[in-house]
Image (spheres, rainbow, N blue to C red):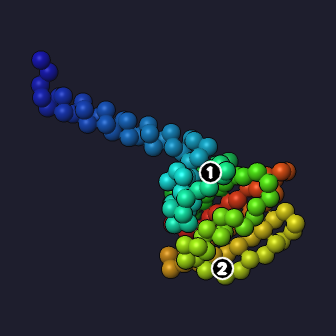
Amino acid sequence: MPHPAFLILSLLALVGAGTYVATELRWRSPTYCIERRGQVWNGEAGALPTDYRPQCPASSSYRAEVRRGDTRVEQYVTSGWHPEALAEQFKAQGFRELDAELITPGLYEVILEKSNGKVYYLAARQGDATEITINGQR
């Protein structure tokens, strides 16, 4: 029978390897930037409506910034043109609108603020869908 210390070290190595693999898989996932599934902005803006699909920017530079903790980003897609829907959820949770602008007929931007920082919200028409990108500091 193996020595108990060997068994403990083996178990610790397996746990460490499993944690490493799970972490690495997150960064390779198409939803790497979503920390709390089903929640907008980690729950600070409420629950994600069922007709919104989470995704993350495909850019490797964005992925690296999020991984380092330099920025936070979430991205969602829904059918139709609904540029303000998730911004309204932020406001309902106490975020204050600093600026909002319909830049072009298919591009809407809002800057929101709460005591813990600013959130930059951009809704872009993508064919018959709306893609919303939300970013800010951690």
Q: Which residue is mark 1?
A: 50
Residue 95 figure quarter: bottom right
Report the quarter where the N terminus lies: top left
Looking at the picture, tell me which residue is in the foreground, 71 or 101: 101
- The residue lying toward the viewer, choosing from 57 and 90, is 90
Residue highlighted by disc 2: 97
Examine the rendered structure and indicate whether residue 12 appears above or below residue 3.
Answer: below
Between 34 and 60, the residue placed more toward the observer is 34
> Residue drawn at (71%, 80%), measured in percent from left and top?
99
Name, please, the residue furthest toward the right: 105
In this picture, is 80 found above or below 85? Answer: above
Secondary structure state at the residue bearing disc 1? loop
| Left or right, 137 with reference to 75 | left
What kind of residue is marked 2?
Glu
Horizontal relation, residue 115 to residue 14: left or right: right
Q: Provide residue 129's location: percent of width, then percent of height.
A: 79, 52
